[in-house]
Amino acid sequence: MTLKHWLGASALLLGSVTTGAVLAQASTETPSDRIVSYDFGSVDTLHQLGLSGLVVGLPKHGLPQYLEAFKAHSYIDAGGLKSPDLAAVEQLSPSQILITGRQSGQQEALAQIAPVTDVSLPEGDYWTAFSTQVHQLADPLNAKAQATDALANLHQHLDQLKQQVSGQKTVLLVTHNDGHFGLRQSPIISELLGLKSPSLPDDVKSIKRGSRVFTPLTIANITQMAPDVLLVVDRSAAIGQTDQALNLAQLKQQLADQQSQTGQAANTITQVKVLTPKLWYLSGNGLESVRLQAEEVAKAIE
C-alpha cells in the first residue's frame, strides 16, 4: 500500500473525529508501510492484527513485558517516550509516525521526517473512541476485517468480565509517585467493567496544570473513602525509579493505622493490589493492553 493511498484513506476517516489527526505530510513516498510508533497501545493493536512486521521502530526503554517480542534486533530503538531519537527515526524512512501527548514537544521535528499521527483518544464514550481509533489504524493498512473481528471478540470478552464482577465491590484507583498518591480515572474500570468508585471527600481539591488535572489524595483521604478494593498504579516503578517505588507492606500498615486512629475499623479496605506498572502507566488503549488491563482488574477484585 503506498503512502499516497494511505493518506487518502486517512483523510476520509479522520474528517469526522478529532483524534488521529494527520499533522504533516512527507515530501516523498516510501515503497511500503513502515511505522515508527511512540504509542505502545498502537503497537499491541498492530501485533493483534498480525501487522507486527510493519513496525520498524519504537522506544525500547520502558517497553512493557507483554511487548517483549519487540526487543528483537529487527525493531530499531527510536529513543525514549519523551525524547525521540530523530536521527534514528530518519534513518528508518518511515511512512508514518504515531505519537501521543508525551511527544508533543518533538511533533514538528518528527513531522519533517514523515507524516505524524496523534493517536491520543478524545474525551467521550470510551468504547466508541477506542474502536474508532483501532479502525483508523487498521483500515488504511487493509486490515478492516481483522479489526472488526478483533473488536467484536474483545467486546464479548469484556462483557463476560463485566458480568463476572458486576455489583461486587467499590474500587478506587490511584497513582503512586515517590510516596504521594493521586486519583486516577480509568474507563476500563468505570465504563467497560461498570465498577463503582467511592465518592471523594468534600475537602479534596483538584489542581489544574495546563490541560491536565491532578487530584492529590492522602492516606487519610483514601481511608475516609473506604473502597472495598484499592488499586495502585506505581508510576515510580513504571519509569524505573525503583528506589522510590511503592512499599506495599508499608502502605497497608499506614492504612490500618489510619483506620485505627479514626475508628473506621468497620470500613476496612479489604484488598490492596498493585497493578502491572508499565502496562498501566506507559501503555493502554490497544487491543491487547485493554484486554490485559480489564483481566487484571477482574482478577484483583475476586
Image (tube, grey):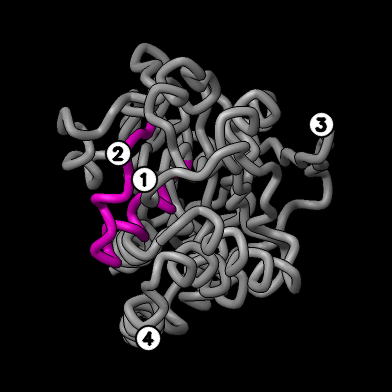
- Which residue is denoted by mark 4 in the rendering? 152
Residue that label 3 marks = 209
| Observer able to see residue 220 | no
Circle 1: residue type: Leu
Q: Are marks 2 and 1 in contact (CB under 8 Å)?
A: yes
Taking the magenta stretch, the answer to whether it contains residue 152 is no
Q: Of tags 3 and 4, which is closer to the observer?
A: 4
**Camera-side mark, 4 or 2:** 4
On the image, numbered disc 2 is attached to which residue?
A: 64
- Locate the C terminus by quadrant: bottom left
- Vertical relation: 91 (above or below) 6: above
The Cα–Cα distance between marks 3 and 4, rounded to whole angstroms, is 38 Å
The one nearer the camera, 29 or 191, is 29
Task: Decide which of 223, 174 is in the foreground and name it.
Answer: 174
Mark 2: which amino acid?
Pro
Alpha carbons under labels 1 and 3: distance apart: 25 Å
3D distance between C-alphas at marks 4 and 1: 22 Å
Question: Rounded to the nearest whole Å, what is the CA distance between mark 3 and mark 2?
Answer: 28 Å
Image x and y of residue 275, in percent:
35, 46
Quarter placement of the N terminus: bottom left
- CB within 8 Å, label 3 to label 4: no
Is residue 56 part of the magenta span, yes or no? yes
